[in-house]
Amino acid sequence: MIRFENELKNDKFVCSECPKCNKLVWPPSDFCSGCFSKVIWRQVSRKGKVIEFSKKDNTIFCLAEFESMIRIMGELEIGTNTPGIGQDLELIKCDYDSKEKFFFQLK
Amino acid sequence: MKRVAIGGFGLTKFNKEDVTIESLMLSSVKSLFDNNSNLIQKDVDVVLTSTNDNSKYLANIVSELAGISPKISHTVESLCNSGANSVVSAFSYISSGLADVALVVGAEKFDNPGLVLEWDTSRGQYKHPVYWSSMFTRSHMRKYGTTMEDLAIVSAKNHKNALANPYAYFDKEYSVDEIMQSKNITEDIRVLDCSFPCNGSAAVLLASEEIIKKFTDCPVWITGIGQKTISAGFTKNDDLTSMKSTKHAAYDAYTMSKKEPKDIDVAEVHDAFSICEVIEVEDLGFAQKGNGNQFIKNMYDTGDKKVNPRGGLIGSGHPLGATGIAQIVEISQQLQNKAQKRQVEGAKVGIVQNMSAAATSSTVLIFES
């Protein structure tokens, strides 16, 4: 998935969208999983919510949802707050370095 | 559709020795032939290999090394449920009449590449299975009050059961306290809540009703099959306290066999992590949702071996491509009353649940003596 990964490298979180079905296609793909039309690419809102989280050493890792559809795992920065399920967060950084990397911050 | 039964099996000791995948497979094939004096190479129509190893042409290589010239031979790969899926394929060849006798062999090396699904974009930098299992664990704790002690009981039970399994990777009993004190991998998973990759190989022989009597007087009939894939990416699991693919597969298997959860005498379930067994006994219908922990605690307290009598993946080790087949070997031994110290008294109906990649795909098989 070269397009998706290249965009991540530039800190851009994009997803494939079907122009015919007018729906996001996730996981990213060159073709719509419903009608097999060629997709277009668009940026995804960086505002999401906490679905679930846990902790490894001093790092919180989190399953987050964007645009009520795209769920990804990433590192969650909480500052002095306590995370809760359904709480708002923001994707503050994404990257690609042999694998996808996502960093969230609690709102 | 022809009836199909298991007519023989072979196993190797799970370990971490340096051997080739071909040699691992051949050793359980040898064990299978050693256990079945009536079986000769010419009887075998189908050879299927189950593995995540990157080797090419493996079913044909194993066939040649075993002196078999099969009609049909190929590898089946589906990460952790490759084993049960390969048996479903063999069943289909026989039940359709394309073949009469199938040899299915699964094997994995401890350093196999199948542990992590690199494709899964949605896992971000958290690709290792400990992260999805932490999500399942935390969700089950949140919704049903599952505790770290509940999870430790799963591991303690399965390590204890594995002591009676001569092929298991582990041969040590752990107390609930020792498991509670074992190293934290994440805040919700300790090292002893995890199954371990290891070398292992398991083989089964399937045959049609017309042929099976040549190999055994106690055939183990495959009477129910359910196989379901929800997705490949972990994050399509919308409810993290449940395994949707397992529920679908179990429904299909129960329906096909005309059995219900209460009819099951013995079960092999895919405890990749402690939380998995808790969710699976609920989703297979042995316990109400949220009561899986109590169901497992009762087994631990009373020495009941109904679930994972060979020690599960946690006690036996998890050689991915061999696991589903080793589960089937265990249920076959149980239903033939040959499970020795692991025997569940009077077992007549057994179930195998084998899943992969955060339960995005599951296979459920029902067996009857």
Image (cartoon, rainbow, N blue to C red):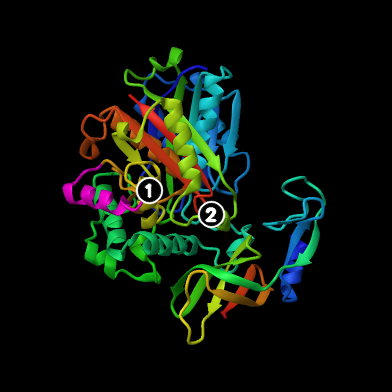
Frontmost residue, B161 versus A67 = A67
* Magenta span of residues: B289-305
Q: Amino acid at mark 1?
A: Phe
Residue B305, position as x, y percentages in the image: 24, 42
Q: Residue at x 50, y 17 (%)?
A: B2
Residue plotted at (30% across, 43% down): B307
Q: Is residue B309 left or right of residue B106?
A: left
Q: Residues within 10 Å of mark 1 (few under 14, many from 20)?
A: many
Predominant SS along the magenta part: helix
Nearest to N terminus: mark 1 or mark 2? 1
Residue B315: x and y in percent read 32, 52
Image position, residue B268 (x, y; %): 36, 41
Label 2, residues with CA under 10 Å away: few <14, some 14-19, many ≥20: many
Q: Chain of mark 2?
A: B
Which residue is disc 2 drawn over? B237
Does B279 sit left or right of B311 as displayed? right
Q: Residue B14, labelled with which disc? A: 1
What SS does tag 1 mark? loop
B301 sits to left or right of B347: left
Secondary element type, mark 2:
loop
Given residues B74 and B32, the one toward you in this image is B74
What quarter of the picture does the C terminus of chain B occupy? Answer: top left
Of all chains, the one bearing label 1 is B
Instruction: State yes or no: residue B311 in magenta.
Output: no
The residue shown at (34%, 53%) is B290
